[in-house]
Image: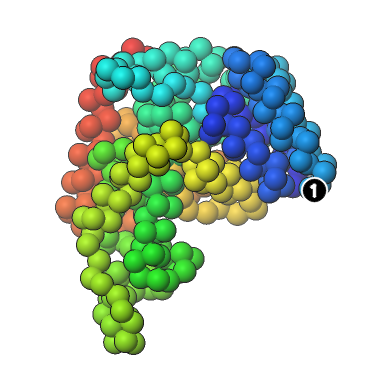
Amino acid sequence: MSSKITIIGAGSVGSTIAYTLAHDEIASEIVLIDINKEKVEGEVMDIEQGTCFRSPVSLVAGDYADAKDSDIVIITSGIARKPGQTRIELTQTNVNILKSITPQIVKEAPDAKYIIVSNPVDIMTYVFTKISGLPENQIMGSGTILDTARLRYGLSEHFQVAQGNIHAYVFGEHGDTSFIPWTGAYISGLSTDEYYEEMKAHGKEVKPLDKEAMLEYVQKSGGKVIAKKGATFYAVSATVCQLVGLILAASDSLATVSSMLHGEYGIEDVCLSTLTLVGPNGIQGKVKMRMNKEEIALLKKSADSLKEVIAQIEL
């Protein structure tokens, strides 16, 4: 697959994305950019010395000018929350970093599709959409794709069924107000409750699904990984590379990316995750999945929570 992908930020997430793109032969040219020149050069050396086991790939420890003609730009830059730092303080710091990056990268790659991974991802996606001047179809945040992956893994473990048979999603912000619209959650065409009854009828030892516990598992997984190893980067990198594959594919797919809403579900002027049509032309629109009134209320609550943060930051 011939494609040029630029990654801004060579931290744990950015460098793991670069490695995965190279190893899985998703990209033919990868540019890695970071303010720490020594580190980015080391990351590129480490990755490229294992490329003899795949088709030829170009890896560059570069600068913004090297991003020219990129098909996709992935932005992972940002800092982690420090002790005593408020969420708003962290958000403003990362917004400021994004504001410094945006004009430089957009100048060099105005036609690229942009994937925002920096946290808080919904706020960063909103800011980039507002300040970049690019068409909205070119911009998406990684959103709740990772949350959705965690949900499908959790359901797979609970019901002992392959993840490929599970169609369930996490909506809202990538954060505390995310939720699972169980109305649209299916395992091989059956609701989770129906699937449980079907498995019982087949003599399977399956426990009833505690939906609140499953949501807590999804929301708390990242924190647990960070507590044990200091950071999360394998799963998020896998989900971002999956999104890259969707953009480079020949047809559209559905994914829970974060993007601007314009009246869908009665929500406007905020970026969060719902089912979205994504493909070679970027974002092609929202797909309104069936949800009940309670679930729509949860989506609006998530939007309101994000808007409260947006109101307190300087764009």
Residue at horizontal 47%, vertical 15%?
Answer: 97
Residue at horizontal 67%, vertical 16%?
Answer: 38
- Residue 196 to residue 166: above or below: below
- Residue 138 to residue 63: above or below: below
Give coordinates of residue 52: x percent, y percent: 82, 44
Give coordinates of residue 93: x percent, y percent: 39, 15
Residue 246 lies left or right of residue 52; in this view the side is left
In front: 247, or 204?
204
Residue at horizontal 44%, vertical 21%?
Answer: 79
Q: How is the image coloured?
A: rainbow
- Residue 88 to residue 188: above or below: above
In front: 137, or 227?
227
Residue 208 lies left or right of residue 127; in this view the side is left
- Residue lying at the far bottom of the rendered structure: 202
- Give the class, few, some or many, for how many residues have Cα within 10 Å of label 1's Cα (few <14, many ≥20): few
Please name the residue that numbered disc 1 is placed on: 53
Secondary structure state at the residue bearing disc 1 = helix
Q: Based on the displayed image, in which of its 4 quarters is residue 65 positioned?
A: top right
Is residue 68 visible from the viewing direction of this image? no
Is residue 41 visible from the viewing direction of this image? yes
Give coordinates of residue 24: x percent, y percent: 68, 48
Amino acid type assigned to the residue bearing label 1 in the image: Phe
